[in-house]
Structures are given as structure tokens and as C-alpha cells.
């Protein structure tokens, strides 16, 4: 079986770390040929020295001397945002795995598709912003979009190609660190508390999104695009143990679920080796220590992110991009302690209310809406 040659964008982050572990675990099936990061030159050099990727990219050009001084071989080095797009087009690569936090992965994703590479998508922002454009482009080029997000990877595994028979998609959510906290206390939670995710170890932006439940809201829209399912058939259930990663209910009422420990190496490996399953060193579930699996309905009124995301997904057009951008600004402000926790969704709602949605937007309209929403959210936060 041929080894898959993979370019990893966002190689120095949490998903990047897990991707490198997977490559190390199944070297006969996966070869890292490209690595890209924003500004962490030291960590990029360490990852490159270990994987021997033949090309690397650092977006922050000012750190190139640090990068070169730490490399113990001579890969091709790309720089800047242009470099990120070039490495996404790397010759003789089969797949580009996008794990860049935020929206900077959108153009490289389209570049990868255009050059005929499969896309493994961790960055949910890409499909939330530009689901129509990205899925249309992939269809036109005949390339696959493989979900890395654990929930979507779970659905992908359950579906196994049977899209037409879906009755409901049920995304599981851990509920985050504030699952049991009273609504009246949400205004006084700290950044440190919000960053303590009960079951997953992830980057800061997605960890805050898990606490507000915007992460699940983004995932609802992502599922809608990935699996071509209308928003009203995408539901959310709270499952605090994060063992069942999502479920699909089929036309006959049967439901399939995918289970594993909460370790991103599972979905990353399946995205890379699909449609094959390959032995690895990951720990299988141990039912003697697992205890119970619980499921409960989300507290929609206390965590408005889910309803805001449903509204954005159902309206479509530029509204999901606006929701995503306003949320990014509000999360960054919360992390800088400029706003309190409930101001995150209050800011997003305010910006969404002010937006005039453009239906079936092209890429320029999406990017314009993204910029507009960032400016609106920044202004709204400034007034607090
Ligand atoms: P991290 O914050 O840990 O890492 C982000 C990565 O993106 C880093 O490599 C960073 O480089 C790079 N990066 C940031 N901005 C840019 C830019 N402008 N250009 C190029 N590279 C950039 O994030 P995570 O790994 O947690 O998440 C990555 C994506 O995957 C997110 O979209 C998240 O929603 C999604 N995801 C993450 C999961 C997880 O378990 N962590 C689970 C499911 C989805 P540098 O280090 O140099 O700044």
C-alpha cells in the first residue's frame, strides 16, 4: 500500500502535534512532506528535523534566521502568506491537512483542491465561512474532503458512504467546563477556568469555544456542509465523558455511534488511511474502567451559541462567516480579559443582528463580510 504524502498546515499546534505522532506511529502508511507554522520557528525546526519534511513554511518572515539556525538539514523553505499557499500546492503531495486556527487556512485549502490534493480539515472555520465554495471546488476537482474534527470523523465513519439514508446527525458535546454551573455565575468565570477543558487538551481558541458551546455551533454548520444534511437534521446532545464522538440515525431508526478515548490521533489517522483501517499503538477502550456514559439535552437558554449557530446555518450566505469572525474577535478579547464570558455571545449576536446577509456569496463577498464583522465586533467591544 502506498504511503500517503501529507503537508501539515498548523504543524506547531495541538493538532499538528497529534499529526506528527500519527506519522511516527504508522510510518509505512504516512509520510510528512511539508510543514507550516505561523511564527513558532523553534518548534517548526524541531518538527522538521524529526520528520525530515522536504518543504517547510514560516508565515512570519522575521523569524527565518532563527528557523534556519535550528535546522539540521536543508529543506525547501517557503515564507509569508504567499509561502503558505505555495506549500499547499507542493508537488508530489497527496493530502493537505489544515490545522490552522482561524481563517488563514481558507486560501491554502482552495489551493490544495485546485492542485488535485485531498483535503483533511481540522480547521472548522474554513467550512463555516465558505462551505459552499470549498465543497463545490472539491466536487469539481474530484478530490476528497476528509474530516479531522472528532465529531465529523465519527459521522464519516458511521456513514461509510450511506448519505442518502440519514435521518438525523447527532453531534456529541462534552458541555465544557461550565456544564453544571448556574447561569447567574457565568458572568464571573475566569479565563483560567474557561481554559480548563474537562476531557480534551486543545489550543486556546477552541477551548474557549467549547466553554461557550460555539465550538458545537460551528460544528453544526460544518456537518451541514460536509454531509449535505439540512441544518434541522443536525442535533446536539451533551455527553460529558467524550467517548461517543457522534452518532447517525438512519431512515430505519437504527443509530450508529463511533467510540474511542478522546485522543485526536484516532480521527487524524482515519482521515489519512481512509478507507483502510490500520493497526497502531493507541489504547483501545477499557470497559472495566470506563464507568457510565451519560447523555443530556443542552441548556439552550444559558448557552445561546447553539441557537445563534443554528440561525446562521439556516440563513446561510454570509451570516456564518460573520458569526465566526465576530466570535474570533470576542474570544480574543475575553482571553485578554477585556470582556466577560457572556459578552462573547452577546457580541456575536449584536454583530449578526446588524448584518445584511448576502446569499450564495463568492469568495470576495465572504472575505468582505468577515472583515466587516471583525470591525463591528471590535467596535462593539470598545463600547463596553
Ligand atoms: P493551536 O492554537 O494549538 O495551533 C494553531 C496552529 O496554527 C499553530 O501551528 C499556529 O502556528 C498556526 N497558525 C496560526 N495562525 C496562522 C496563520 N495566520 N498562518 C499560518 N499558521 C497559523 O490550535 P489547534 O491545533 O487546537 O486547532 C487548530 C484548528 O483545528 C482549529 O481550527 C481548531 O478549531 C481545529 N480543531 C482542533 C482540535 C484540537 O483537538 N485541538 C479538535 C478539532 C478541531 P504558530 O504555532 O507558529 O503560531
Image (cartoon, rainbow, N blue to C red):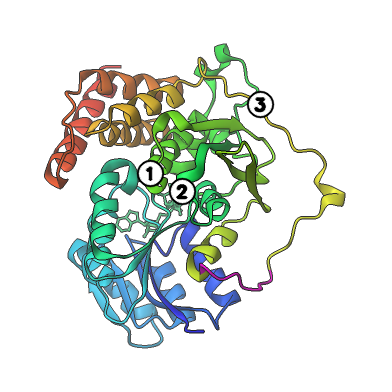
The residue indicated by pointer 1 is: 228
The residue indicated by pointer 2 is: 163
Q: Main secondary structure of the magenta part?
A: loop
Residue 157: x and y, percent? 56, 55
Residue located 17% across and 42% down the image: 367
Disc 1 under 8 Å from ligand 1? The reply is: no
Q: Nearer the viewer, residue 97 or 276?
A: 276
Distance of mark 1 from mark 3, alpha carbons?
Answer: 26 Å
The magenta stretch is 274-281
Residue 48, compared with residue 229, is above or below; it is: below
Residue that protrudes farthest toward the right in the picture: 288
> Is residue 109 in sight in this rendering?
yes
Are dots 1 and 2 in contact, CB under 8 Å? yes
In this rendering, position of residue 98 left or right of residue 255: left
Q: Nearer the viewer, residue 49 or 112?
A: 112
Distance of mark 1 from mark 2, alpha carbons?
Answer: 8 Å
The residue indicated by pointer 3 is: 296
Residue located 46% across and 62% down the image: 16
Residue 326: x and y, percent? 29, 31
Are dots 1 and 3 in contact, CB under 8 Å? no
Distance of mark 2 from mark 3, alpha carbons?
Answer: 26 Å
Q: Nearer the viewer, residue 185 or 313?
A: 313
Residue 240: x and y, percent? 67, 35
> Is residue 9 in sight in this rendering?
no
Question: Between disc 1 and disc 2, whose residue precedes?
Answer: 2
Residue 119, numbered circle: none
Amino acid at each position: 500500500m502506498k504511503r500517503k504524502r501529507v503537508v501539515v498546515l498548523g504543524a506547531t499546534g495541538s493538532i499538528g502535534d497529534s499529526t506528527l505522532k500519527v506519522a511516527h506511529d504508522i510510518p509505512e502508511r504516512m509520510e510528512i512532506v511539508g510543514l507550516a507554522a505561523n511564527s513558532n520557528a523553534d518548534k517548526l525546526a524541531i518538527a522538521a528535523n524529526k520528520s525530515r519534511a522536504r518543504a517547510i513554511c514560516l508565515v512570519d518572515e522575521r523569524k527565518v534566521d532563527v528557523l534556519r539556525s535550528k535546522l539540521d538539514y536543508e529543506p525547501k523553505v517557503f515564507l509569508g502568506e504567499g509561502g503558505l499557499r505555495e506549500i499547499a500546492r507542493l508537488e508530489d503531495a497527496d493530502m493537505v491537512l489544515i490545522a490552522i486556527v482561524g481563517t488563514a487556512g481558507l486560501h491554502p485549502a482552495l489551493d490544495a483542491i485546485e492542485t488535485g490534493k485531498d483535503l483533511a480539515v481540522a480547521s472548522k472555520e474554513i467550512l463555516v465561512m465558505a462551505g459552499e465554495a470549498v465543497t463545490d471546488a472539491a466536487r469539481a476537482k474530484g478530490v476528497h474532503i476528509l474530516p479531522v474534527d472528532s465529531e465529523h470523523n465519527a459521522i464519516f465513519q458511521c456513514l461509510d458512504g450511506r448519505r442518502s439514508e440519514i435521518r438525523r446527525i447527532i453531534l456529541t458535546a462534552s458541555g465544557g467546563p461550565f456544564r453544571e454551573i448556574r447561569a447567574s455565575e457565568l458572568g464571573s468565570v475566569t479565563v483560567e477556568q474557561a481554559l480548563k477543558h474537562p476531557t480534551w487538551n486543545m489550543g486556546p481558541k477552541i477551548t474557549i469555544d467549547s466553554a461557550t458551546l460555539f465550538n458545537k455551533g460551528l460544528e453544526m454548520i460544518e456537518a451541514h456542509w460536509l454531509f449535505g444534511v439540512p441544518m434541522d437534521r443536525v442535533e446536539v446532545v451533551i455527553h460529558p465523558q467524550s467517548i461517543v464522538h457522534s452518532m447517525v440515525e438512519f431512515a430505519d431508526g437504527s443509530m450508529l455511534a463511533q467510540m474511542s478515548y478522546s485522543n485526536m490521533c484516532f480521527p487524524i489517522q482515519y482521515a489519512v488511511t481512509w478507507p483502510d483501517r490500520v493497526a497502531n499503538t493507541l489504547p483501545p477502550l477499557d470497559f472495566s474502567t470506563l464507568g457510565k456514559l451519560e447523555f443530556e439535552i443542552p441548556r439552550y437558554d444559558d448557552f445561546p451559541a447553539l441557537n445563534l449557530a443554528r440561525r446562521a446555518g439556516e440563513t446561510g450566505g454570509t451570516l456564518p462567516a460573520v458569526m465566526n469572525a465576530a466570535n474570533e474577535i470576542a474570544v480574543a478579547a475575553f482571553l485578554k480579559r477585556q470582556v466577560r464570558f457572556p459578552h462573547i455571545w452577546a457580541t456575536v449576536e449584536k454583530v449578526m443582528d446588524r448584518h445584511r446577509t448576502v446569499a450564495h456569496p463568492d469568495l470576495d463577498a465572504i472575505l468582505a463580510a468577515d472583515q466587516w464583522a471583525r470591525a463591528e465586533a471590535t467596535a462593539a467591544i470598545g463600547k463596553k
